[in-house]
Image: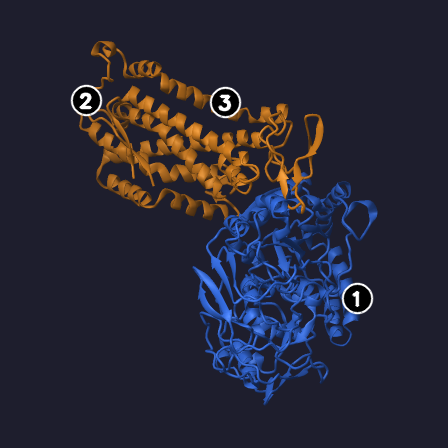
């Protein structure tokens, strides 16, 4: 997930992703939950703008909308709706149980719970499941249809001719029994069933983008979607709690998200109790104020995310391993953490996988002090030695970043550092909407580009294979998430092996992913900077705060009564 | 958008300043008369002195940075420390409170180092404001001079030859005039700054990060604003009897343009120049504030304000200091412009056109 806006960048994620993965659970992330309150009342949230892109649940790819969609819709599987490590565990949602795959991991048979109703009063059945997945292809612009769900038999034909999509072979329905037949075993298939693209919609839903999410089975329904004004969710009167783990009943009667306030104004609104929660992150110059005056209303949680600058390993001067390693050794990650907001808001890192993630083992070779697990400081002498040996001194380098305050400041830091190391560096700051596709497109010959990545679901391949797999590099495409254009045959072979192993032995697969993480880090396709944390600011009346590592602040579990 | 328009006095024969007698100016050259009037205008002189002070101080930026503040204002000093009142402190300091969130740059020390504090890269704001002044003034003065020179030459050609040349040049100017200044400048700057090779005319190559890029863009967008009044002046002067007399004596076109017409329209350009500089300094600051003027880590007053935008709550001086410099510069140039106008052409009107 590319920061908060994921957009269409993942459309071209490769088949390799499907073959990769691991099925382990992540370790816990620390969070604090406040005492629970009562039911009722209106939870008022504020955001700068409506979620970008279509509001259609099978198209939208933003955290902002997903945080609301999980309250109104369900998949066959769900991530447990809890704080901390338990929140990464998959539990049955519309399905009665999580089945064991058969046929070498290629067949999954689910039994739907009976009596579940959509918010329009219609009853859920197997036909809705089949229609949902066919719609995913028929609407033609679901970002991950061709990369995540193309393993379903018949999906290839659906990609070619979406309008006539027929998944009768891939999804067999017998009453409430639904059987998925896959073309290849996919260790991450259950993860993909637990995200909003696969949330079940009524079979009567139009096969075109809708302007408000259609009826779902969750405790709320979408009553208003006015992108210039607000989103409003009200209670779904047909909802009866069937699994507290998967879809607990919500506390507030309505959940409203109002648009049009700058982050500065959002902070003020929440401080003054005019809003209960702000979606956007508070600006840097309000943090001290929040920290001193409103500490009891601020929650900080680590994220399974990484911020990095990607070297282009196919462009001079960073087609040279020693040059890349040299810059890594020279980077003062504490300075970068300071730019982001300080050590309370980010942790320095050298590797790809974030802490508490499947396959994570601390590894940092680019540090002083001789350790290899934790970054302690930059080693400028070693950096200069490596860069001298690389013979790349004096090369011109364009540091590509966005015009956002923090991103630009990070870019400026690297301009100074690269100049100090003997390069001729200049800054290229582009609007965030332009910079991400620009940096992905190899025809732009980006040399050193800013990016960041937030998990879609807890699997090592979601970082390693998507961002650094050979199949994730698409020449001359704006949808090429492998910005570094990195492709190492030996490492890719291990990624493929780990993916296959994940079906039968998730623990062994994670061991292999840890080795892949180490090997990639040694090849230095990035300067991994830090793992960020997330700040939630609440009004005085909000009780029952819970932070899910998958969905972040669980809005409906908060109470305003 | 407010723009200025200059309407020169069409009858240069009767140019007595208010309270000035014909005796005082009789027998003196127009330039001496203007100089005498300007010297008597104390407000204009004070404005000139202020402007010169800003120019001198700004161009002494390297001396301040190297000899007084001992800092590199273009390099990041995020992890650096500095000494304040004998104590070593972090340039970027961890936020306070129970949670210790955020990092705050050091505020004004009112000492040699970090006199106005630091920005979010730990750079000395005072040094950057002075360096910013160099860039803003260089671009402002440079673009105003280039703009006036090009506009003057084009106006001479259009007004003297008239006919198809005048029609063509006037329509091109109308075309440029039709675009809102900032929209046009932003469009051109966006294209040039995202072109990796910068501007390449074959014989001249300008890097995208060069100060020449904003200078030329700003000069270009303001040409019609000088061209129009000067062309009107040329058309008027060309009909004067002394021009006809020169024609009857067989003077060449070049001589007519540069010896007869130019001296009689140059005062219009001179009057406009300070006002143009004020306008171009503002435009440069606006473009740099929008990240499409001077490119970081170089400084201009606009980029320093942009740096300070994210620090308004905690370190307002980062944005206020360059803002004050812009206000003082523009104010001094406007007052000076009025003084020059009064000296050269006391009955002309300079008005703001919406």
Q: Colour of chain A?
A: blue
Q: Quadrant of the C terminus of chain A?
A: bottom right
Check the residue under mark 1 and report the chain it is in: A
Q: Is label 2 or label 3 in front?
A: 3
Give the SS element for disc 1.
helix
Say which of B328 and A351 sits in front: B328
Q: Label 3 neighbourhood size at 10 Å, few (<14), some (14-19), many (20+)?
A: some
Q: Position of residue B133 (x, y in %)?
A: 50, 30
Say which of B274 and A227 sits in front: A227
* Point 61% across, 59% down: residue: A543
* Dots 2 and 1 on the same chain: no
Q: Label 2 neighbourhood size at 10 Å, few (<14), some (14-19), many (20+)?
A: few
Q: Position of residue A300 (x, y in %)?
A: 65, 54
Residue that badge 3 annotates: B56
* Circles 2 and 1 in contact, beta carbons < 8 Å: no
Gap in Å between the C-alphas at discs 1 and 3? 65 Å
Residue that badge 2 annotates: B242
Q: Is label 1 or label 3 in front?
A: 1
* Dots 1 and 3 on the same chain: no
Please identify the residue farthest to the bottom as the structure is shown.
Answer: A174
């Amino acid at each position: 997930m590319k920061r908060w806006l994921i957009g269409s960048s993942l459309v071209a994620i490769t088949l390799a992703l499907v073959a990769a993965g691991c099925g382990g659970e992540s370790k816990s992330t620390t969070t604090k939950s406040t005492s629970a309150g009562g039911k009722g009342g209106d939870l008022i949230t504020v955001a700068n703008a409506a979620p970008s892109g279509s509001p259609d649940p099978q198209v939208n790819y933003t955290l902002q909308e997903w945080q609301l969609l999980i309250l109104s819709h369900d998949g066959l599987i769900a991530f447990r709706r809890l704080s901390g490590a338990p929140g990464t565990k998959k539990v049955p949602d519309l399905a009665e149980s999580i089945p064991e795959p058969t046929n070498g991991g290629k067949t999954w048979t689910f039994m739907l719970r009976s009596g579940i109703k959509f918010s329009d009063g219609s009853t859920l059945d197997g036909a809705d499941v089949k229609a949902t997945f066919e719609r995913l292809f028929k609407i033609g612009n679901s970002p991950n249809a061709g990369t995540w769900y193309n393993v379903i038999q018949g999906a290839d034909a659906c990609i070619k001719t979406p309008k006539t999509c027929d998944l009768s072979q891939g999804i067999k329905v017998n009453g409430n029994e639904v059987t998925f037949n896959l073309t290849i075993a996919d260790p991450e298939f259950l993860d993909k069933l637990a995200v909003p693209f696969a949330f079940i919609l009524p079979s009567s839903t139009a096969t075109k983008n809708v302007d408000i999410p259609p009826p779902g089975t969750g405790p709320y329904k979408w009553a208003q979607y006015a992108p210039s004004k607000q989103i409003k969710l009200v209670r779904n009167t047909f909802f009866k709690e069937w699994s507290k783990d998967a879809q607990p009943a919500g506390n507030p009667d309505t959940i409203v998200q109002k648009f049009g306030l700058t982050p500065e104004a959002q902070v003020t609104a929440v401080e003054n109790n005019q809003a209960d929660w702000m979606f956007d992150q508070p600006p840097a110059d309000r943090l001290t104020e929040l920290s001193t005056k409103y500490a009891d209303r601020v929650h900080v949680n680590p994220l399974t995310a990484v911020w990095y600058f990607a070297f282009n390993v196919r462009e001079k001067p960073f087609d040279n391993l020693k040059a890349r390693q040299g810059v890594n050794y020279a980077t003062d990650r504490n300075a970068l953490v300071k730019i982001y907001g300080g050590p309370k808001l980010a942790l320095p890192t050298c590797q790809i996988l974030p802490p508490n993630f499947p396959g994570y083992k601390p590894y940092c070779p680019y540090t002083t002090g001789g350790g290899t697990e934790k970054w302690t400081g930059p080693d400028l002498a070693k950096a200069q030695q490596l860069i001298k040996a690389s013979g790349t001194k004096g090369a011109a380098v364009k540091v590509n970043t966005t015009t956002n305050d923090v991103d630009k400041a990070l870019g400026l830091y690297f301009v100074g550092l690269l100049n100090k190391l003997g390069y001729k560096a200049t800054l290229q700051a582009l609007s965030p909407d332009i910079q991400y596709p620009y940096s992905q497109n190899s025809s732009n010959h980006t040399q050193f580009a800013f990016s960041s990545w937030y998990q879609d679901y807890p699997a090592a391949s979601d970082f390693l294979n998507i961002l650094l797999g050979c199949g994730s590099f698409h020449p001359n495409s704006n949808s090429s998430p492998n910005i570094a254009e990195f492709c190492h045959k030996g490492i890719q072979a291990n990624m493929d092996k780990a993916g296959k192993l994940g079906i039968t032995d998730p623990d062994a697969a994670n061991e292999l992913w840890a080795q892949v993480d180490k090997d990639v880090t040694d090849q230095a396709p990035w300067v991994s900077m830090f793992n960020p944390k997330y700040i939630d600011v609440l009004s005085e009346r909000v009780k029952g705060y819970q932070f899910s590592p998958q969905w972040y602040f669980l809005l409906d579990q908060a109470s305003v009564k | 958008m407010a723009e200025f328009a200059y309407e020169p006095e069409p009858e240069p024969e009767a140019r007595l300043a208010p309270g000035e007698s014909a005796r005082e100016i009789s027998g003196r050259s127009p330039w001496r008369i203007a100089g005498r009037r300007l010297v008597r205008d104390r407000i204009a002189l004070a404005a000139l002195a202020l402007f010169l002070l800003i120019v001198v101080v700004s161009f002494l930026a390297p001396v301040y940075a190297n000899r007084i503040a001992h800092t590199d204002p273009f390099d990041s000093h995020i992890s650096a420390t500095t000494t304040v009142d004998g104590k070593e402190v972090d340039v970027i300091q961890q936020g306070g409170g129970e949670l210790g969130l955020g990092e705050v740059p050091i505020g004004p020390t009112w000492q040699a180092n970090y006199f106005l504090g630091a920005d979010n890269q730990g750079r000395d704001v005072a040094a950057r404001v002075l360096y910013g002044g160099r860039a803003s003034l260089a671009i402002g003065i440079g673009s105003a001079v280039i703009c006036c020179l090009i506009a003057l030459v084009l106006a001479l050609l259009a007004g003297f030859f008239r006919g198809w040349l005048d029609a063509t040049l006037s329509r091109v100017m109308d075309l440029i005039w039709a675009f809102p200044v900032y929209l046009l400048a932003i469009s051109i700057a966006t294209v040039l700054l995202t072109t990796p090779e910068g501007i390449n005319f074959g014989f001249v190559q300008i890097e995208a990060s060069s100060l020449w890029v904003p200078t030329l863009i700003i000069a270009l967008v303001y040409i019609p604003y000088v061209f129009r009044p000067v062309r009107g002046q040329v058309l008027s002067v060309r009909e004067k009897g002394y021009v006809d007399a020169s024609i009857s004596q067989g003077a060449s076109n070049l001589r007519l343009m540069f010896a007869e017409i130019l001296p009689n329209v140059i005062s219009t350009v001179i009057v406009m120049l300070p006002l143009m500089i004020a306008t171009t300094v503002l435009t440069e600051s606006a473009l740099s504030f929008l990240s499409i003027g001077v490119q970081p880590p170089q400084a201009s007053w606009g980029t320093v304000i942009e740096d300070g935008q994210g620090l308004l709550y905690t370190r307002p001086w980062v944005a206020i200091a360059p803002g004050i410099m812009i206000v003082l510069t523009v104010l001094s140039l406007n007052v000076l412009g009025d003084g020059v106008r009064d000296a050269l052409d006391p009955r002309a009107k300079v008005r703001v056109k919406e």
